[in-house]
Image: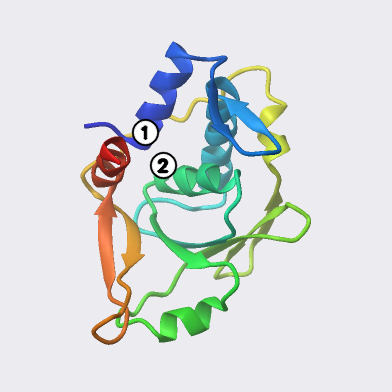
Amino acid sequence: NKTIYAYFQENCQKYPQKTAFLNEEESYTWQESFRMYSYLIQKFKNCGIGKGKTVTIATPRHLDSPFVIFAAVATQAYIMLCDSNREIGDFLKNCAATIAPAYVIRRNLFGKWILESKDGQLLSFDKRDGLDFTEMVTAPLTCDEKEGSYIFFTSGSTGKSKAALVTQYALLNNLKFM
């Protein structure tokens, strides 16, 4: 019964120097992960991402992606993941749901993340932006782990893909038992 934020915070306190995320090229400790995650939460909140907003994240499989996704969830927005190789409009046309994202976040070829809002606001950020902090950024949350957070789409085996709303509670427990 935790939010993803509480999970990150708890592990940062228990295991600050232990490796939390890694791939063949780089790794992050729990402390580095929590700093970056907290930094992105503040960045997103400052841009207006928050409760009830829909954010589409078109992300490749990359080590930075979980931080962006989890930080957007921590703002209490609804997160919709999209294949980074597809046009978002085309993707949504093939779904049975009518969803109009207020924000789109993408990772460009140079490793920068670009956040664009419906009203044309642009923000560019990089994972290194959040790792330069000497003090932890705090982002107190009142998020309910049992409220919907993620919009996932079914495979569409019986027609068009259908949207399903998943909670942080369900996501964390799925990961725990995998």
Q: Amino acid at mark 1?
A: Leu
List the residue tagged with mark 2: 74
Residue 123: x, y in percent?
67, 55
- Residue lying furthest right: 110
Percent position of residue 75, x then y: 42, 45
Note whether residue 72 is visible: yes
Q: Is residue 164 left or right of residue 110?
A: left
> Which residue type does callout 2 highlight?
Ala
Q: Nearer the viewer, residue 68 or 50?
A: 68
Q: Is residue 54 visible?
A: no
Disc number lying in front (1 or 2): 2
What percent of the width, then of the height, locates residue 73? 41, 47
Task: Classify mark 2: helix, strand or loop.
Answer: helix
Separation of marks 1 and 2 at Cα, in angstroms: 7 Å
Say if 36 sits above or below 58 in the image. Answer: above
Describe residue 168's horizontal placement relative to residue 47 as left or right. Answer: left
Is the C-beta separation of discs 1 and 2 under 8 Å?
yes
The quadrant of the image that shows the C terminus is top left
Mark 1 lies on residue: 141
Mark 1 or mark 2, earlier in chain = 2
| Occupied quadrant, residue 119 | bottom right
x 55%, y 33%: residue: 21
Tell me where residue 28 sits by quadrant. Answer: top right
